[in-house]
Image (cartoon, rainbow, N blue to C red):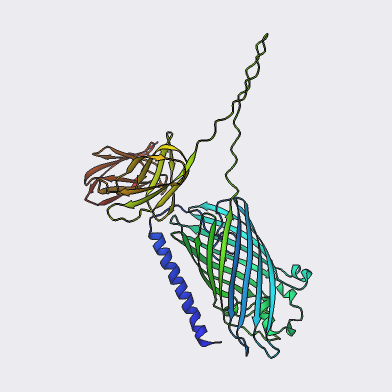
C-alpha cells in the first residue's frame, strides 16, 4: 500500500472530527431556534449521508438525483480505476411513523490494461427500504429500518436470489438550534456473491466493479447535520465490518469518512455536494481470494433534492341548519341557499428586522401581526427576514419584539399585488437589566408558577419547563414566587446596569 495514503487516513479522520466538533459548538452556542426538519440524503429520505433521521414531519413525497465520479488507486501491478456514478431515489412518508423508499444505483467502471487490454462495464443495483420511528421526547428520536439491495447481474433470477439484507437500529438527537446528531448499528446478511459464479475466472477490474461479498457485515455509523443560514453541513463516519469464517481484519473492511453540504433553494428544492474518503487498507484480491467489496479511495457526488407536499388537510364542509318545520296548515317553502361570499383578497408580508444602533440583523426576534382580533406569528426565513402569507388586504398591526430592545409596533396597510416588504429598525429598551430564573419542584421537574417582582408590579408566569425572564431597570427588587399547593417564596435581587440576575427556585409542597 502507498505509505502516504496509509498515514493520510488518520489525518482525514482527525480533521473530520475537529470540523464536526467546531461547527456543532458554534451552532449549539447560538440562541436556540425551533428546527424540526432536515434535508434528504441520496435515498430521498431525511438523514446525514448513510445515517437516517426519523421523525421529520409527514406526509411527503421526495425525489433525489445524484451523479458523480469515483477513483480507485492502482491494485497489484495495474493502473488506477475510474467510475462514473448515477443514482435515482424516490421516498414516500405516508404516515407519521413510516417511510418507504426505492433507489436505483448505476455504475460505469473503466479499468486499466491488465495484460488483456483495458476494460469497461456498467452495472445497476436496485434497493428497497422501509423505515419506522419517531420522536420519543427531549429531542431524541428512535427507530429502525429494513433494506434489501439486489445487485446487478446478467440474469434477473440471479439478482433476485442474491440480495444483501440489512436490519438497523436508528437513533438521533435534535438540539433546539437545529443541529442533529444521528447514528445506527445493525447487521447485513450478504448473499451478493451469488451473482459472481466462477469468480476465480474474473479479471481484477470486474471483481472491483461488481462489489459483491462472501461475508456478512456489522453496520455502524455516526454523523451530524449542522444548519448554517439556508445550508446544512454534513459529516459522518461509517463502516461495514466484515464478519464470518475467513473474514479479513477490521482495517480491510469498508470504512469511510463522509463530508458534504446541502443548499436550500426553496422550501421544496435543494442542491447537495457530498464526498466519501475510504479509510480502509486493501486486502488480497487475487483470483483465489474470497470476494470482498473494494470501495473507491475517493468519490464525489453532486445531487438535487425535491420534496412534494400534498397540501393542507381538507377543510370540513359547513353545517347547514335544517329548514324550519312547516306549520300544520300552511307549508312554508324551504329557504333558498345563500351563496357564500367570495374569499377576501390576500397578500404576503415580509419583514426585515435589524438593530438600528449597529445595523446587525436580528435573527432571534419574534414578529407577529394582529388582524381581526387574532394574533398570527411570522415565520423565520433566513438571517433577518420573517414572512407570513395569506394576509387579508387592509390594515393590520405589526408587532416585533427582541430581547433587551424596545418593542416595535405599527399599523401596516396591506394592498394587493407584489408581496409587501417592511424594514424594522429596533432601538434599546429603557430597561437595561434582567431577572431570569428556573422554578422546579424537589423532583427536578419545572413548574408553571406565578412570579411577581416589586417595585414595578411585574407579573409573569413561568414556562412549562419552569423558566422565566423579566426585563427591569437597575435597582433592588423583591421576587415573590407562588403556586397553589406549594409554599410561597420571597427572594431579593439587586440588578446593576446591563446586569442579569439568575434565580433558581426549588418549591416545597405545603403539608397536607
Residue 89 placement, left or right of 32? right
Q: Position of residue 7 (x, y in %)?
A: 49, 83
Whether residue 315 appears in this view of the structure is yes
Classify residue 106 by image quadrant. Answer: bottom right
Q: Nearer the viewer, residue 165 or 319?
A: 319
Quadrant containing the N terminus is bottom right
Q: Is residue 143 left or right of residue 328?
A: left
Instruction: Specify the quadrant of the image occupied by residue 175.
Output: bottom left
Asked if residue 333 is positioned above or below residue 127 in the image, the reply reads above
**Foreground: 445 or 403?**
403
Q: Position of residue 356 (x, y in %)?
A: 29, 52
Say which of 184 and 93 sits in front.
93
Q: Residue at x 64, y 75 (%)?
A: 243
Across and down, in percent, residue 342 comes to 54, 33
In the displayed structure, 294 sits above or below 89; it is below
Return the residue found at the far front: 417
Q: Position of residue 333 (x, y in %)?
A: 66, 17
Question: Viewed as shown, does residue 36 lie left or right of 430?
Answer: right
Q: Is residue 203 above or below residue 344?
A: below
What residue is rendered at 63% in x and 67% in y?
Answer: 87
Amino acid at each position: 500500500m502507498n505509505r502516504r495514503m496509509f498515514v493520510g487516513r488518520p489525518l482525514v479522520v482527525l480533521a473530520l472530527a475537529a470540523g464536526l466538533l467546531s461547527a456543532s459548538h458554534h451552532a449549539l452556542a447560538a440562541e436556540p431556534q425551533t428546527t424540526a426538519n432536515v434535508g434528504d440524503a441520496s435515498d430521498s429520505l431525511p438523514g446525514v449521508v448513510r445515517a437516517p433521521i426519523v421523525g421529520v414531519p409527514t406526509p411527503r413525497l421526495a425525489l433525489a438525483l445524484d451523479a458523480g465520479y469515483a477513483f480507485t488507486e492502482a491494485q497489484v501491478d495495474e493502473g488506477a480505476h475510474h467510475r462514473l456514478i448515477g443514482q435515482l431515489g424516490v421516498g414516500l412518508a405516508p404516515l407519521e411513523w413510516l417511510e418507504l423508499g426505492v433507489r436505483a444505483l448505476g455504475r460505469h467502471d473503466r479499468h486499466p490494461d491488465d495484460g488483456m487490454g483495458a476494460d469497461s462495464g456498467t452495472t445497476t443495483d436496485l434497493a428497497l427500504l422501509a423505515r419506522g420511528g419517531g420522536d420519543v421526547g427531549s429531542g431524541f428520536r428512535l427507530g429502525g429500518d429494513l433494506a434489501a439491495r439486489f445487485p446487478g447481474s446478467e440474469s434477473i433470477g440471479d439478482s433476485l436470489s442474491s440480495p444483501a439484507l440489512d436490519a438497523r437500529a436508528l437513533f438521533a438527537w435534535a438540539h433546539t438550534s437545529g443541529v442533529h446528531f444521528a447514528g445506527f448499528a445493525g447487521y447485513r446478511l450478504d448473499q451478493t456473491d451469488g451473482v459472481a459464479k466462477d469468480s476465480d475466472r474474473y479479471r481484477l477490474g470486474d471483481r472491483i466493479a461488481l462489489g459483491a461479498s462472501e461475508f456478512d457485515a456489522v453496520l455502524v455509523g455516526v454523523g451530524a447535520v449542522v444548519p448554517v443560514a439556508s445550508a446544512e453541513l454534513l459529516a459522518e463516519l461509517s463502516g461495514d465490518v466484515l464478519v464470518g469464517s475467513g473474514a479479513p481484519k477490521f482495517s480491510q473492511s469498508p470504512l469511510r469518512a463522509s463530508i458534504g453540504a446541502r443548499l436550500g433553494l426553496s422550501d421544496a428544492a435543494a442542491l447537495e455536494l457530498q464526498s466519501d474518503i475510504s479509510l480502509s487498507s486493501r486486502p488480497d484480491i487475487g483470483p483465489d481470494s474470497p470476494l470482498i467489496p473494494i470501495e473507491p479511495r475517493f468519490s464525489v457526488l453532486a445531487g438535487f433534492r425535491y420534496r412534494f407536499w400534498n397540501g393542507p388537510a381538507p377543510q370540513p364542509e359547513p353545517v347547514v341548519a335544517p329548514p324550519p318545520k312547516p306549520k300544520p296548515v300552511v307549508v312554508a317553502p324551504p329557504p333558498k341557499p345563500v351563496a357564500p361570499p367570495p374569499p377576501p383578497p390576500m397578500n404576503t408580508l415580509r419583514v426585515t428586522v435589524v438593530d438600528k444602533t449597529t445595523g446587525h440583523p436580528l435573527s432571534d426576534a419574534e414578529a407577529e401581526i394582529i388582524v381581526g382580533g387574532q394574533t398570527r406569528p411570522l415565520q423565520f426565513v433566513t438571517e433577518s427576514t420573517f414572512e407570513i402569507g395569506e394576509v387579508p388586504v387592509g390594515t393590520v398591526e405589526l408587532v416585533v419584539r427582541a430581547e433587551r430592545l424596545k418593542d416595535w409596533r405599527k399599523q401596516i396597510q396591506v394592498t394587493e399585488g407584489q408581496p409587501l416588504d417592511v424594514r424594522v429598525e429596533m432601538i434599546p429598551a429603557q430597561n437595561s437589566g434582567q431577572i431570569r430564573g428556573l422554578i422546579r419542584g424537589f423532583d427536578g421537574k419545572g413548574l408553571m408558577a406565578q412570579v411577581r417582582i416589586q417595585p414595578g408590579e411585574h407579573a409573569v408566569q413561568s414556562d412549562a419547563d419552569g423558566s422565566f425572564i423579566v426585563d427591569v431597570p437597575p435597582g433592588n427588587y423583591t421576587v415573590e414566587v407562588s403556586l397553589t399547593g406549594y409554599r410561597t417564596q420571597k427572594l431579593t435581587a439587586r440588578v446593576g446596569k446591563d446586569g442579569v440576575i439568575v434565580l433558581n427556585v426549588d418549591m416545597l409542597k405545603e403539608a397536607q
